Image (cartoon, rainbow, N blue to C red):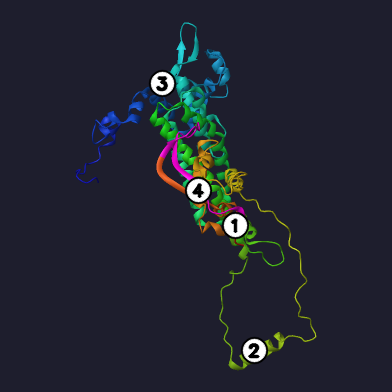
């Protein structure tokens, strides 16, 4: 219950069904000021068509959708009744007549009495565009690929809308949270399960990067659309930065893997076999089929048994007690994620700058923009996120490219001022510079 608002009894179902959309809110004027409610109000015909298609039982709804989408896929603009009967010859006549009548009542199918044929209405084409994803075979990551396809296609046609970018932004945020939870769990099973999805999401977002960059460049006159596009660029940068986190998490899981004896099997192999086993209870066999029964013995019997056990377990001096011969374990491969190439390019650039100039005795100070700008907006944002790693004491201990960047003999200085850039993807960025801390000959060696 909202504070200050008295509780209200729920209206009967019949009243709700007959009520207007505005009557379902505490303030009837609220939907008039909401952008989404305004758009839905102008799509009432499409909403009524969808209601008519999806009302009723599951079998009837599937039959209506199948007939409607088949009619929409026909290359002929007009179909006679004989053509329709031939197209749906496998459907019972009574059911086909009921479906055609429902489509006519919904104004999706029009019967022309003059030419004695059927044709689809303009509303039918709009409805078919909404139902088009249902005709595709189920694929992995449909929720992300569909949104990216809408954004990229709308950008090519000049019909991109801010709501599409907001939906894509929300989906990328949800995927980022799922991947972050998998990394935080430290479970090798969850990491292996999430790694293919992360690779596909990263590849899909990278393919759509050109469309996002074009949206940022072409819609400076629409602040809402530009902000949504830049938020997507930030999401892409977050996914790029997560690649190194995935690599570290998988390496940590590999260090915790244990090899079982000389068989070459690991705990990961055992876990995978147990997960694929159809009936784990069968592994117990008849171990618990017989209950535990107590056995009562006298003291003399216990002494006799203990003496015989001691004699039996006494080692034989004539028998070799050496270790079994060594066995070579099978070689395996470890597939890990590679770090983004932008990290390696940044390290190479800093190494080139560390070379003294021919006319100077020391390394020159470099502007921050020279290391950040270049490529798309997502790449520039990713390089900007890497700057705090330079000189970080904890990151210096890592034996990876992240550690190489942290041990670079440079110092980053940022100021609260912004300056305009000539880069087509970045309009403003923070003013700063990179100052060398020592010459290459004076650089401390990386810790082992």
What numbered label is drawn on residue 106? 3
Marks 3 and 4, how far apart in space?
Answer: 59 Å
Q: Pointers 3 and 4 in contact (CB under 8 A)?
A: no
Earlier-in-chain disc, 3 versus 4: 3
Quarter of image, res 274: bottom right
Secondary structure of the residue carrying numbered label 1: helix
Residue 279 seen in the figure: no
Q: Is residue 121 magenta?
A: no
What numbered label is drawn on residue 442? 1
What numbered label is drawn on residue 306? 2
Marks 2 and 4, how far apart in space?
Answer: 72 Å
Earlier-in-chain disc, 1 versus 4: 4
Of 405 and 137, nearer the camera is 405
Q: Number of callouts in the render?
A: 4
Earlier-in-chain disc, 1 versus 2: 2
User: Residue 349, image x and y in percent?
Assistant: 59, 44
Marks 1 and 4, how far apart in space?
Answer: 22 Å
Q: Pointers 3 and 2 in contact (CB under 8 A)?
A: no
Q: Nearer the viewer, mark 1 or mark 3?
A: 1
Q: Residue furthest top?
A: 114
Q: Nearer the viewer, mark 2 or mark 4?
A: 4
Marks 1 and 2, how far apart in space?
Answer: 73 Å
User: Residue 191, image x and y in percent?
Assistant: 56, 52
Q: Which residue is mark 4?
A: 387
């Amino acid at each position: 219950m909202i504070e200050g608002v008295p509780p209200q009894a729920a209206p009967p179902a019949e009243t709700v069904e007959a009520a207007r959309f505005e009557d379902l809110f505490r303030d009837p004027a609220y939907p008039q000021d909401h952008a989404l409610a305004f758009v839905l109000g102008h799509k009432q015909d499409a909403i009524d068509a969808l209601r008519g298609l999806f009302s009723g039982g599951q079998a009837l709804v599937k039959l209506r959708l199948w007939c409607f989408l088949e009619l929409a896929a026909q290359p002929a603009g007009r179909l006679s009744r004989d053509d329709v009967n031939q197209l749906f010859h496998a459907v019972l006549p009574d059911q086909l007549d009921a479906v055609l009548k429902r489509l006519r009542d919904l104004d999706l199918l029009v019967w022309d009495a003059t030419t004695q044929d059927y044709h689809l209405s303009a509303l039918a084409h709009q409805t078919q565009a909404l139902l088009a994803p249902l005709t595709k075979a189920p694929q992995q990551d449909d929720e992300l690929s569909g949104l990216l396809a809408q954004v990229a296609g709308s950008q090519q046609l000049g019909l991109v809308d801010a709501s599409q970018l907001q939906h894509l932004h929300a989906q990328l945020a949800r995927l980022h949270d799922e991947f972050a939870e998998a990394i935080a769990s430290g479970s090798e099973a969850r990491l292996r399960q999430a790694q293919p999805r992360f690779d596909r999401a990263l590849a899909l977002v990278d393919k759509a990067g050109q469309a996002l960059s074009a949206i940022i460049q072409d819609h400076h006159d629409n602040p809402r659309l530009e902000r949504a596009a830049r938020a997507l660029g930030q999401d892409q940068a977050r996914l790029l930065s997560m690649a190194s986190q995935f690599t570290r998490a998988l390496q940590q899981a590999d260090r915790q893997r244990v090899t079982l004896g000389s068989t070459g099997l690991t705990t990961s192999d055992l876990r995978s076999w147990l997960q694929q086993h159809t009936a784990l209870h069968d592994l117990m066999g008849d171990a618990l089929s017989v209950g535990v029964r107590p056995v009562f013995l006298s003291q003399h019997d216990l002494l006799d048994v203990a003496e015989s056990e001691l004699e039996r377990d006494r080692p034989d001096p004539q028998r070799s007690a050496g270790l079994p011969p060594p066995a070579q374990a099978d070689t395996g491969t470890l597939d890990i994620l590679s770090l983004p190439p932008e990290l390696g390019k940044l390290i190479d650039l800093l190494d080139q700058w560390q070379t003294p100039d021919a006319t100077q005795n020391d390394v020159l100070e470099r502007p921050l923009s020279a290391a950040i700008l270049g490529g798309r907006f997502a790449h520039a944002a990713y390089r900007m996120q890497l700057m705090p790693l330079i000189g970080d004491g904890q990151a210096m201990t890592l034996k990876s490219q992240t550690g190489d960047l942290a041990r670079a003999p440079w110092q980053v200085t940022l100021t609260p001022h912004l300056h305009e850039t000539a880069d087509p993807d970045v309009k403003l960025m923070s003013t700063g510079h990179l100052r060398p801390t020592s010459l290459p000959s004076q650089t401390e060696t990386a810790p082992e």
